[in-house]
Amino acid sequence: MTALTGTVEARPRIGLDFWWLPRALILGLLAFAIFGPLANLALWAVAERWYFPHALPLEYGFSFWARVFSPRGNAMESLTNSIVVALLTVTVSLALAIPAGYALARLKLPLRRLILLVFMIPQAFPNLPVYVNVARLFYEIGLNGTIAGVVLVHVTHGLVFAVWIATASFSAVDIELEQAARCIGAGALQAFRDVTLPLAMPGLMASAIFVFLESLDEFTGSYFVGAPDVNMLPLLLYSAGAGGNYQIASITALLLLVPSIGFMLVVERFLKADVLSRVGR
Amino acid sequence: MSKRLLGLVLVLPALAVIALLFLFPLGISIVGAFESDRRYGLGNFEKAFALYSQDVIFTMAIVGFSTLVIGTFSVAIAGYLTLGENPRAVAILRWLYRWPMFIPFIVVGQVLRTFLAKNGLMNNILIGASILTPIQASGFLDWRGIVIAFVWKQTPFVTLLLAGAMASLDRGTIEAARNLGASRLRILIEIVMPQVATTLVVGLILSFVTMMSVLSVPLMINAQSPTMITADIAFRINAYGDYGVANALGLISLGVTACVAWIYLRQTMKERS
């Protein structure tokens, strides 16, 4: 540590800062608390044999990965289902959220704040009792146990992110650019398509990723509406874990984990401060 | 006027989804809670309390305690991020704390189930480091496991909100207090916290609601009695198809949440007036 030139040091500093001892201890404990469980997951994913009282796996290998990714395994089916459902959820959510977000950002709506709050409701109430009854309703109209049914449940749950972020990204677009396009003869739709939409795209991408992850990770709704006909990754993880097959469960968990952590690392690239500061306004 | 109409037309489909797929089933759930044997009454609630009153208390205690712990940790972390004077330590902490935020609950359940078990990696490491003897080792897969799972997953979220609010505070008052010789702990408690209290409460209430409705964590970490209301609801439906008692339990958890929201609303009203 070098003392900054020009500052007056009250005490002469020697090379070492002893505050690093408690700091390192606390940061180390925190790192253990966060990465310990994750390391454990990674170990289970590559453990061939691991039982008490051995602290570490006895044998490492990828035979369980081969089993998970074998064409006949039900993991591939779950993975495909999960991705199809998540992509459909993103499509439907954005189809609903882009018009709604534009209207909430640009057009004078009565009760605008109340409308924004309505989208919050599915996050603000315990949703288990609701899913239970959605499953019963869907059963009566033949939607239970279908991809469409699961997609609808996920859309409801993810719509708050889609609408709030879409609203924020449309209001972050400079309205004068739109007006300029209108002045040189563009129609309302053309101005939206050629000016507003491209400028709002990074924010809309962020909301799409949010909705995708929310759908990929959703358990409760899939459990009641999807199972046992539509197998999804979280359901596979649950049943593998319940059956004591920790390798399969850990590999599935890892598959769910990677997109989530990847997104955490890049979220700031998509969600710029100008959009972020407008979320929920 | 036509602009207003256009706006409503554009918002309507999204609102309809919420109304049809959330508010409507929510209404059914509330009505269904009072309906047993085709008659309306409190029968479901009597049954729910007779069978599950212990679980209701257990749930409230666990979620309440987790909320307190989450609050404490997030104040400590966000406070250090704002007031910490060593840029390197602040940078490490900022990088470190948010890892669990986007990890889904179902993965948290699986990860902690293997980590906290009696023969899990945590005890193995502690035994390996001679901090514990094999006889002292015990599993954490009971109420402690649920609390740890909730705190692990929800603390980063509340911290993120809180650190954001703290970052937008006026640095001038903090610097002034620091120049006058106030300790950083005192600045955190007396200057920073009062200004960001609302953000903290909002974050904690959102966490509270989330924890009240998580099904995977109690199912995976602690499915034996006493367990959380959500696990009971799932059990009631899967084992007996008993929607009446399940809906009554659902309404009880809604009621608990509503109480928390009411406390929050009353406080903000008091602040405004």
Image (spheres, coloured by chain):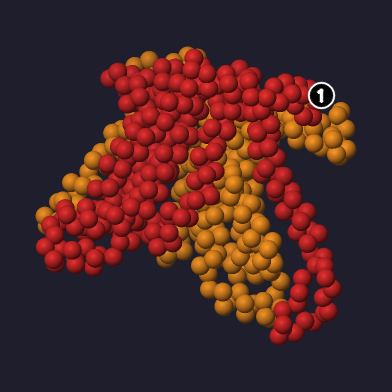
- The image shows residue A280 at horizontal and vertical percentages of 38, 55
Name the foreground residue: A135 vs A67: A67
Q: Tell me the shade of chain A.
A: red
Instruction: Check the image and report above or below for B68 versus B24.
Output: below
Instruction: Check the image and report above or below for B222 versus A211.
Output: above
Instruction: Check the image and report above or below for A115 versus A255.
Output: below
Instruction: Check the image and report above or below for A271 versus B138.
Output: below
Q: Residue at x 46, y 55 (%)?
A: A269
- The answer to which image quadrant residue B182 occupies is bottom right
- The image shows residue A72 at horizontal and vertical percentages of 49, 14
* Quadrant of the frame with the N terminus of chain B: bottom left
* Quadrant of the frame with the C terminus of chain B: bottom left
Q: How many marks?
A: 1
Q: Amino acid at mark 1?
A: Pro
Question: Considering the numbered disc 1 on the image, is that residue within a helix, a strand or a loop?
Answer: loop
Q: Does residue B222 appear in this view?
A: no
Q: Residue at x 18, y 63 (%)?
A: A181
Left or right relative to B73: residue A56? right
- The answer to which image quadrant residue A35 occupies is top right
Q: Residue at x 62, y 51 (%)?
A: B97
- The image shows residue A248 at horizontal and vertical percentages of 59, 23
Name the foreground residue: A123 vs A162: A162
Q: Tell me the shade of chain B.
A: orange
**Host chain of mark 1:** A
Left or right relative to A7: residue B192? left
- The image shows residue A159 at horizontal and vertical percentages of 35, 42
Q: Does residue A27 appear in this view?
A: yes
Q: Which residue is mark 1?
A: A53
Badge 1 local density, few (<14 within 10 Å), some, or many (20+)? few
Q: Residue at x 68, y 81 (%)?
A: B180
